[in-house]
Amino acid sequence: MARLVTAARSVTGPHRADNQDSVGCGPRFAFVADGVGGHAGGDVASWTVTHRLMAALGTRDLARLGADDLRELVAVANADLALRVGREPSLRGMATTFTGLFCAEDEVRVAHIGDSRAYLVRDGEGRRVTRDDSLVQALVDQGVVDPRDAREHPHRNVILRSLSGDRADAAGVTVLDVDAAPGDRWLLASDGLTDYVPEDELLALLTGAATPDDAAEALVRAALDADAHDNVSVAVCDVATGDPAPGERPRYLGAAADESQGYVGPLAREDVDPGAGRSSEG
């Protein structure tokens, strides 16, 4: 059965007061959730979905987790958002994107909603696997916006689908099955990376790095060098085989993280406040 060797980073960045991204990873899964900007409680939304899913995945056999099962788990996590709003009406309007990898026997399932992205590098060639659920992507598909102009479009952050606690949200989750090959490298990223680092540069950094840790560090550095005005979160996952190493356990970083949930990585110490960045190997 395939497993993931993952390096993850999440930094607040110099232009934001808090981190609304969340990253969860373990030996057989990884995902990124980005609290929708401008809405109340984006950090609560991403944190809630991530922690609910991590708890659920700890009790499931991922090899037997099909597309409908994934949507069901996401629906349960999404329902927690509605419960939070019921208890705290000030959170009304909170939402989050979600993009994740889940290892089955000989394939990787990609679950996606919103505009956080998944990329795959295989045999030295990289490509984007997910399609943004965004207004600009819809305009590109209709031929109204040139793909070359999409990254600079003033409405690039308007998303059409997300997890917001509505019962219909889970039906909008796209699940893709991709065969897994040892040596594959995946990137999951919030738009704090993809809005500021051109895709060809992103893929070059992802492909050229020797290890997932090196790739994650280089990608976050590129976003910060590009003066990203958003939180930046990445999970770089190399596909391997065999059982996880002894002591490997799920990790969380990002919104509401504390020192017990990860260690502060080099980029966090150099570039942002001490509570803003976390690094984990899963």
Image (tube, helix red, strand yellow):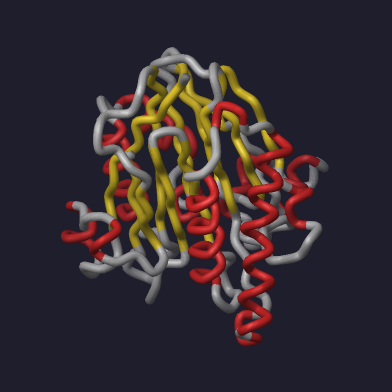
- 200 sits left or right of 79 in the view: left
Numbered marks: total: 0
Q: Nearer the viewer, residue 77 or 58?
A: 58
Residue 178 in view here: yes
Expressed as whole percent of the image width and height from the top left, the position of residue 14 reads 32, 68
- Classify the position of the C terminus by image quarter: top left
- 78 sits left or right of 241 in the view: right
Choose top left, top right, bottom left or bottom right for residue 202: top left
Q: Nearer the viewer, residue 268 or 107?
A: 107
Name the residue located 53 percent from the left edge and 36 percent from the top edge: 101
Expressed as whole percent of the image width and height from the top left, the position of residue 192 reads 46, 55
Residue 205 in view here: no
Expressed as whole percent of the image width and height from the top left, the position of residue 232 reads 40, 55
Name the residue located 61 percent from the left edge and 41 percent from the top edge: 148
Name the residue located 41 percent from the left edge and 35 percent from the top edge: 201
Choose top left, top right, bottom left or bottom right for residue 36: bottom right
- 124 sits left or right of 44 in the view: left
Name the residue located 68 percent from the left edge and 81 percent from the top edge: 86
Above or below, comparing residue 200 to residue 88 in the picture: above
